[in-house]
Amino acid sequence: MLTSRRSIIVGVLVAIAQTIALGVAAGITGSAALKTQTATNLADVAVGVFLLVGVISGQRPADDRHPLGYGREGFFWSFLAAIGIFVGGVGAAMAETLQTALHPQPAGSYLIGYLVLLIVIALDTIALVSGLRPLRTRAAQQHMKLAAYLWRGTDPAVTTLVLSSAAGLVGGVIASLGLAGRQLFDHPATDVVASALIGLVLLGTSAVLLRTNRELLTGRGLPAAQISEMRALVGSYPGVLAVPDIFAVVVGPSTLIVDGDIVFEDALDVSAVESTIVSISSALRRRWPSIAYVYLNPVAQQRSRRNQRVDR
C-alpha cells in the first residue's frame, strides 16, 4: 500500500503542476481543448485527494465494528473519484465545447500552447509509469494479465490512477492535434472537435471506473477460472473426497475472503481434518497472497449456500 500511496501523491503533484500550466496556456491561446484539459486536470487533483483519503482510511486495522477491516471504505472513495472524473471532466468538456462552438474566440500564441502540452504529456507519462508499477505487482499477485486486471482488478485506487493518467495522456495528444488543426485551417472547428473527443475519452474512463467500484462495493467475487483453480487445489489434498462449494469475495483492495465446504474421507479423525484444513489454508494464501481470511468447513454432503448462511 505504500507504493499505492506514493503513486497517488505523485499523481496529485503532477495534476497540480499541469493545471497551473494549462490554465496559463489556455488563457493565452484561447484554445477550447486547452481549457477542457485545464478543467479535467483540476478534477484530477480532487480525484487524487479522494484516492489518497481512501488508501489511508482503508488501511485501518480491523475492530469489533468492522471485523474484516476497512478495505471497502477505499472502494467508496474510489467511487467518489470516478464520479469526480465524470462530473468535473465530462461536464467541463461538454460546457467548453458548446461555449466555443457558439462563441469562438481568436487564437493567441500557438508556441506557448504546444510547449505546455508537451510538458503536460511528459508529466502524464511519468504519472502513468508510476501508477503502472503497483498495478503490475497486483496483477502478478492475482496471476492475471495487466489488461485483465484493469478490468477485473481489486485495487480501484491504483486502477483509477492509471486510467486517469492514460486519459490525460490521450487528452493531451488530442488537444495538440486540435490546436494544430486550428493553426493550420485558421478555424476553431478542429479545436471544438478536440474538446468533444476529450470529453468522450473521459466519459469512457469514468464509465469503466464506476462499473468497477459499483461491483466492489456490492461484494464482487472472483472469475470462474480462479474459483476453479482454488477448487482444484483444495481437492488435490489427501483425504478430500469433494469440494461441493467454494467462493471468494473481495473485502478490500487486493484483499479476499475465501469460504468453502469440504467432504473428507470418513476414516480421517478430527485432528487429521483440522491439520488438512490448516495446510489447505496456507497453500491458498501462498498461491494467492491477497487472501486474508480462509474459512473451510468439513461437511457430510453438499448443502445450499442459503442454508449455509442460516446455520451460521
Image: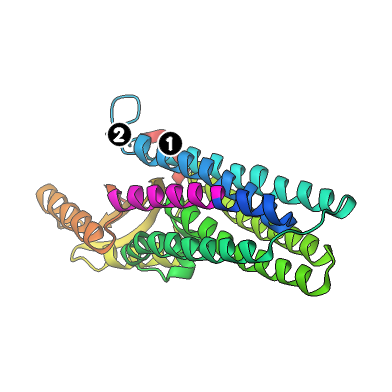
Describe the element under mark 2 as helix, strand or loop: loop
Residue at the farthest left position:
271
The amino acid beneath tag 2 is Arg
- Side of 247 relative to 242 (left or right): right
Q: Quadrant of residue 134?
A: bottom left
Q: Nearer the viewer, residue 21 or 149?
A: 21
Q: Position of residue 220 (x, y in %)?
A: 49, 49
Q: Quadrant of residue 312?
A: top left
Q: Nearer the viewer, residue 151 or 127?
A: 127
Q: CA distance from mark 1 to mark 2?
A: 10 Å
Question: Residue, x 51% and y 63% (percent of image)?
Answer: 119
Q: Is residue 7 magenta?
A: yes
Q: 10 Å neighbourhood of mark 1: few (<14), some, or many (≥20)?
A: many
Q: Position of residue 202 (x, y in %)?
A: 65, 56
- Side of 122 relative to 311 (left or right): right
Q: Is residue 256 visible?
A: no
Question: Residue, x 61% and y 50% (percent of image)?
Answer: 24
Q: Which residues are magenta?
A: 1-20
Total marks placed: 2
Q: Quadrant of residue 191?
A: bottom right
The amino acid beneath tag 1 is Glu
Question: Residue, x 61% and y 47% (percent of image)?
Answer: 85
Query: Which labelled disc corresponds to residue 60?
Result: 2
Tell me if label 1 and label 2 are in contact, CB under 8 Å.
yes
Q: Main secondary structure of the magenta part?
A: helix
Q: What residue is pinned by disc 1? A: 73
Q: Nearer the viewer, residue 190 or 306?
A: 190
Q: Earlier in the sequence, mark 1 or mark 2?
A: 2
Residue at the farthest bottom position:
184
Q: Is residue 265 magenta?
A: no
